[in-house]
Amino acid sequence: ILDKAARAAETGDFAEVHRILEMLTKPFETPTNVAEARPPSLARLDANTVGEVGAKAAEILQDADFWRRLCPELRVADAASEGACASIFEASEHQVEMLRAAMKRDGVFALP
């Protein structure tokens, strides 16, 4: 990602550099591009964008068991979690602020 931004900047295109800077300096604010508010789908992960070990990295990142080994409490590909995520989640502004505060404080939050 940084190499791509650097190559673009060398040609005078600083948009990607500004996007990265915004994400790094304001990690908990709503991004300018709303599409960046959610992580990219691993199903669309392009192995070429992850460097020399791209194919292996893509394979590992798409393996739910990898994430379970990393943190057994995660509900990766858990049927109950998938069912909960399948429904539309709505939160009041107060709930959003509480979740945002938990993310800033703990680096993670749990949905009710």
Image: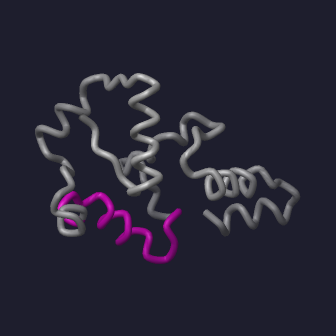
- Dominant SS in magenta: helix
Which residue shows up at 84% across the image and 66% down it?
A: 10
Left or right of residue 24: residue 71: left
Which residue shows up at 37% across the image and 63% down it?
A: 58
Which residue shows up at 76% across the image and 65% down it?
A: 7
Magenta stretch encompasses residue 64: yes
Residue 12 lies, in percent from the top left, at: 88, 57
The answer to whether 83 is drawn above or below residue 73 in the figure is above
Residue 51 lies, in percent from the top left, at: 51, 72
Left or right of residue 60: residue 32: right
In this rendered view, identify the residue nearer to me: 79 or 8: 79
Residue span colored magenta = 49-66
Residue 71 lies, in percent from the top left, at: 22, 64
The answer to whether 6 is drawn above or below residue 35 in the figure is below
- Give the residue at the far right of this rendering: 12
Q: Which colour scheme is used?
A: one colour
Quadrant in which the N terminus appears: bottom right
The answer to whether 79 is drawn above or below residue 18 in the figure is above
Left or right of residue 93: residue 4: right
In this rendered view, identify the residue nearer to me: 104 or 23: 104
Magenta stretch encompasses residue 106: no
- Give the residue at the far bottom of this rendering: 52
